[in-house]
Image (cartoon, helix red, strand yellow):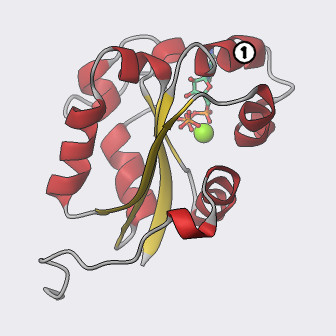
Amino acid sequence: MDRTFVMVKPDGVQRGLIGEFISRFEAKGLKLVGAKLERLSKERVIEQYREHLEKPFFPGLASYIMSGPCFLMAWEGKDAVAVVRRMIGATNPAEAAPGSIRGDFALDIGRNVIHASDSPESAARELGIHFAPDELIDYSRIDESVLY
Ligand code: RTP
Ligand code: MG
């Protein structure tokens, strides 16, 4: 089973959207295996977004992510990484499909409400940055044994 790292960004937290986003992933059939509300340090933002360190938008991105607490989650399920990326939609919310989280709840690329890992390798790396192993919990969902 894939695990992926998902983070409600400060604008999503401040707009009271944590529950809405969790509901969508739960309804899809994904399993929440870790969660916490946290202010990210500069060091953690640099680690999370190290691929963008030299980009012109990095300073603005870093101050955005540090502008308030983030809600950090680990979600598990079949193809969880790709499924969650599709559910959050395109990076630029103006182009994100209606029905996706960014398509439904955001308009500006600099305030796109949510992050999700873009590959299984990124997911493993990002989960390692933000969660200790004992913060990720093993259990079964009631619908988990229904496999096709
Ligand atoms: P994320 O990592 O946050 O899930 O977003 P993503 O994969 O869809 O997009 P990515 O290319 O990794 O960009 C990371 C975040 O940086 C901000 N950004 N701003 N002003 C700009 O041109 C620009 N480009 C990217 C966005 O907040 C984006 O989510
Ligand atoms: Mg990214």
Q: Is mark 1 within 8 Å of ligand 1?
A: yes
Is 84 rendered above or below residue 41? below
Residue at the right extreme, as displayed:
54
Q: Seen in the image, is 138 located left or right of residue 53?
A: left
Residue at the front extreme, as displayed:
134
**Location of the N terminus (image quadrant):** bottom left
Percent of width and height locating residue 50: 79, 38
Q: Seen in the image, is 115 located left or right of residue 48?
A: left
At 58% from the left and 13% from the top, the residue drawn is 67
Q: In which image quadrant can residue 12 be found?
A: top left
Q: In which image quadrant can residue 41 be found?
A: top right
Q: Seen in the image, is 15 located left or right of residue 122?
A: left
Is 105 rendered above or below residue 51? above
Mark 1 nearby-residue class (10 Å; few <14, some 14–19, many ≥20): few
Percent of width and height locating residue 71: 45, 36
Is 64 rendered above or below residue 17? above
At 25% from the left and 79% from the top, the residue drawn is 140
Three-letter amino acid code at the position of disc 1 = Phe
Q: Seen in the image, is 47 located left or right of residue 36?
A: right
The residue nearer to you, when weighing 145 against 80, is 145
Percent of width and height locating residue 112: 45, 21
At 49% from the left and 59% from the top, the residue drawn is 4
**Location of the C terminus (image quadrant):** bottom left
Dot 1 corresponds to which residue? Answer: 57
- Residue 94 visible? The answer is no
- Residue 112 visible? The answer is yes
Looking at the rendered structure, the secondary structure element under dot 1 is: loop
The residue nearer to you, when weighing 74 against 122, is 74
- Ligand 1: image quarter: top right
Percent of width and height locating residue 130: 63, 50
